[in-house]
Structures are given as structure tokens and as C-alpha cells.
């Protein structure tokens, strides 16, 4: 019997899987491909170097449909500020992408999955197949949180983008048979904010074989020292905002107690302004830029920090650190939607003084670091493999097909 066809439309090329959304989507697609329940077609833009990623692509789909990925120019992005769509959405619009998706839809897939609301700009007005929109965040919430923290003209700009994103999400989410959220808080927020009834939820996962438990680099930390690590794409404004908080409000308190403390910020494209601040202040902070593998940096650190105040969805980086056995200090938002317990699997701190004190507490107490690390690893092992998350997603897709068939008959 022919397997049902699943068309997955992504607004960005997924490989390498080096940031949260791509990691989540890529691993779910690998699970769907591995189970064999669907014949999976992935449609996305592809950069010139996509030909070097054929093995990764093949692990995630049976067929790959693509169009040329052309990053919008700075002039186009600036011009789109005055447009009807949020800048982030307008940047994903592509005539070539719409043609490629339309061609794939002519094969009548049983279910279509649209990755992020942004990808709706690639879709036709009418969808004949069962349809899901996979939203990794409440997008408007991100802009609203930026607006809350911004000052001057930036506050107006973020508020304007938040207004446009709320309008866009309201219009788009109702077009699909069901919405898939990545956490309970997002599921509730989407239902309440946009009056949606069909909002499903999946868990966040982690690759437990790749991110294996590792022994701490140091059981006892020199009282003068200590090493922190944070991993994230540093061209994402929410992450940059978090590092400025770490440097401005946390670091002076840490340095006063441990003068040779060090931090390693791992992630591609750190902004020049951030590098300049570190250099001008003479801080013992390293910006690595892009690295092919974050694990050596995480395993060498004493504490993993998540100093975030802007965002939505869930932070996969938290589960990766937990899987490797690194104790975490995070803001409430940094672990939002992950159902972690303060004092059991991480330490929570929501201002500069509390954040510094939590880090110093962990650096001073090896037994506490090891207890949190062991508890966190047990938690992700028990509940959060990508295999189980992919099975959840597969069930939602099958249910959508059944519901569409029932509605027709």
C-alpha cells in the first residue's frame, strides 16, 4: 500500500542544524523519515553549498524540492520596515519559492506542514490537503518582549513590528486545520490570543547519543577562577541582548569575587559592538564565532548560563547542556516551557544580583553542581528523546489526515 505523502515547507535551509528551530525541525523530519509512515518531501530554499549536504538532506526526507536562497539585501530589509508585513516575514517571500511549492502541491500530498508562520508567504490561498502550521514560538510575543526592553526609537520600531506580527499571526494561523506548538505555555497563549481551538503540543527533544553525559572538567574550582559557557546564534537580537545583560549587570559582581573568571560565548556572527565592548573593558570573555561542534566548549565549562529576557517557544540549548551534565543558571524565560524545577534541575535568577549569586554558589559547591547535573540528565533521558517527539508529531499528522477525510465524507 502506498504511504501517505507529507509535504513539509520550510522558509529556510535546515542544514547544518546549528540553531534551535533547525535542530527541532531537522530531528523531527529525521524521525518521520526513519519511521517510514510517510513519504516525505521537504521544500525549502537552498544555498549554493547545498550540494555538500546531500547525506543530511537524505536523512530527513525522501525527496528534496528547492529554490535558490537569496538573502534579502540590507536595502530591501530597511524598505520593508514601512511595509504591511513584519520584516522577518517579508524577508522570506520568494516568487521562486511559491512556484516550487505550487509544483509540489500538484502531487496532492495527504498532509502539508508549514514550518513557522513566515512560510505562509510561500503558500497558495487555498489548501486542498490536510494542513498543519508548526510554530516554534508565539512570534508576536518575541517582538513585544523586545519592545518592553528597548529604549528610544528602537522601542517604537519593535512595537510597530509587534503590531504587524500580531495582525499577521491572527490572519495566518486560522487558515490551517491545526497548529502545532512546542510548549504548554505557547499552546495556551495561541489559543487565548488568537481564539484558536485546534492547537496541539509537542515536547522539546535532545539528541542523547550526540550530547552524552561528560565528567566535570574540575570537581573543585580555583577560588579565583571559573568558566561559564553560553551557546547560541549571535546574530539573533534576543541572544545579543542576553549577553549585554551578562556583561553589564552580572560580570562586575562575578569579577569582584573571582577576578580571573572566564566566559566563552559560542555562536556564529557575533556583532562588532559586542566584541568592542569586551575589548574596551578588557573582559576575560571569548566570542568564538561559528564552531562545527559546541560540545568541547560545553564540556570544559563549570556552569552553563542562559541570560535571556526575550524569546518565545523553548530553548533547546537548555536540554543540550542538561544532557551533557552541565549545571544551568537561567532566567525564567530561558527555560520557559521546559517544566524544570529550581534547585532540582537548574538555578533560576531573574536580575543581575541573583544571577551572579547563583553562578557563585555553583562555583563554590562542587557537590551542588554534580547533583543538579545528574538530576537534569536523568530528566532528559526519561522524557525527551527526539524519537519520542517525532512520534508525537507523526500522530498529529495522521490525525489531521483522518479529520480531513471525515470532513469530506
Image (tube, rainbow, N blue to C red):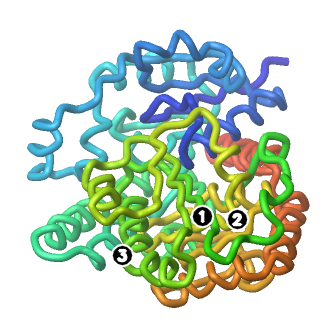
- In what quadrant of the picture does the N terminus appear? top right
Q: Tell me the SS state at disc 3.
A: helix
Residue at 81% over, 28% down: 34
| Residue labelled with disc 1 | 228
Q: Position of residue 308 (x, y in %)?
A: 47, 70
Q: Are marks 2 and 1 in contact (CB under 8 Å)?
A: yes
User: Mark 1, residues whose alpha carbon is within 10 Å: few (<14), some, or many (≥20)?
Assistant: many
- In what quadrant of the picture does the C terminus appear? top right
- Circle nearer the N terminus (2, 1): 1
Q: Position of residue 125 (x, y in %)?
A: 35, 38
Q: Position of residue 201 (x, y in %)?
A: 66, 61
- Front residue of 7/239: it is 239
The Cα atoms of the two marked residues, 2 and 1, are separated by 6 Å
| Residue labelled with disc 3 | 248
Residue at 29% over, 77% down: 149
- Front residue of 253/274: it is 253
| Residue labelled with disc 2 | 302
User: Mark 2, residues whose alpha carbon is within 10 Å: few (<14), some, or many (≥20)?
Assistant: many
Say whether residue 104 is left or right of residue 237. Answer: right
Q: Tell me the SS state at disc 1.
A: strand
The answer to whether residue 406 shows anywhere in this view is: no
- Front residue of 267/103: it is 267
Say whether residue 336 is left or right of residue 150. Answer: right
Amino acid at each position: 500500500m502506498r504511504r501517505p505523502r507529507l509535504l513539509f515547507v520550510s522558509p529556510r535551509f535546515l542544514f547544518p542544524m546549528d540553531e534551535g528551530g533547525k535542530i527541532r525541525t531537522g530531528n523531527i523530519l529525521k524521525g518521520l523519515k526513519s519511521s517510514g509512515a510517510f513519504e516525505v518531501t521537504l521544500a525549502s530554499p537552498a544555498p549554493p553549498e547545498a550540494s555538500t549536504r546531500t547525506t543530511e538532506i537524505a536523512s530527513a526526507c525522501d525527496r528534496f524540492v528547492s529554490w535558490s536562497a537569496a538573502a534579502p539585501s540590507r536595502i530591501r530589509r530597511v524598505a520593508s520596515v514601512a511595509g504591511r508585513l513584519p520584516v522577518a516575514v517579508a524577508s522570506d517571500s520568494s516568487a521562486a519559492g511559491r512556484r516550487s511549492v505550487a509544483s509540489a502541491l500538484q502531487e496532492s500530498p495527504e498532509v502539508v506542514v508549514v514550518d513557522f508562520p513566515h512560510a505562509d508567504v510561500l503558500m497558495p490561498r487555498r489548501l486542498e490537503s490536510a494542513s498543519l502550521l508548526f510554530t516554534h514560538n508565539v512570534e508576536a510575543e518575541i517582538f513585544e518582549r523586545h519592545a518592553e526592553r528597548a529604549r528610544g526609537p528602537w522601542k517604537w520600531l519593535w512595537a510597530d513590528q509587534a503590531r504587524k506580527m500580531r495582525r499577521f499571526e491572527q490572519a495566518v494561523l486560522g487558515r490551517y486545520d491545526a497548529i502545532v506548538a512546542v510548549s504548554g505555555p505557547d499552546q495556551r497563549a495561541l489559543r487565548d490570543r488568537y481564539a484558536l481551538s485546534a492547537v496541539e503540543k509537542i515536547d522539546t527533544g535532545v539528541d542523547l547519543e550526540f550530547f552524552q553525559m561528560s565528567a566535570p572538567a574540575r570537581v573543585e574550582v580555583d577560588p579565583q577562577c571559573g568558566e561559564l559557557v553560553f551557546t547560541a546564534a549571535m546574530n539573533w537580537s534576543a541572544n545579543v541582548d542576553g549577553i549585554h545583560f551578562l556583561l553589564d549587570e552580572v560580570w562586575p559582581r562575578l569579577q569582584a569575587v573571582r577576578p580571573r573568571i572566564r566566559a566563552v560565548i559560542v555562536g556564529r556572527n557575533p556583532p562588532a559592538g559586542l566584541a568592542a565592548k569586551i575589548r574596551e573593558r578588557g573582559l576575560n570573555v571569548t566570542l568564538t564565532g561559528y564552531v562545527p561542534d559546541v560540545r568541547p566548549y560545553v564540556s570544559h565549562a563549570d556552569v552553563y548560563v542562559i541570560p535571556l529576557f526575550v524569546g518565545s517557544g523553548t530553548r533547546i540549548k537548555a536540554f543540550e547542556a542538561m544532557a551533557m551534565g552541565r549545571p544551568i543558571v537561567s532566567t525564567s524565560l530561558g527555560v520557559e516551557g521546559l517544566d524544570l524545577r529550581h534547585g532540582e534541575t537548574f538555578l533560576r535568577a531573574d536580575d543581575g544580583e541573583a544571577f551572579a549569586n547563583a553562578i557563585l554558589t555553583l562555583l563554590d559547591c562542587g557537590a551542588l553542581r554534580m547533583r543538579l547535573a545528574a538530576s537534569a540528565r536523568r530528566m532528559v533521558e526519561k522524557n525527551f528523546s527526539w524519537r519520542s517527539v517525532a512520534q508525537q508529531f507523526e500522530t498529529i499528522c495522521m490525525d489531521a489526515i483522518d479529520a480531513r477525510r471525515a470532513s469530506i465524507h
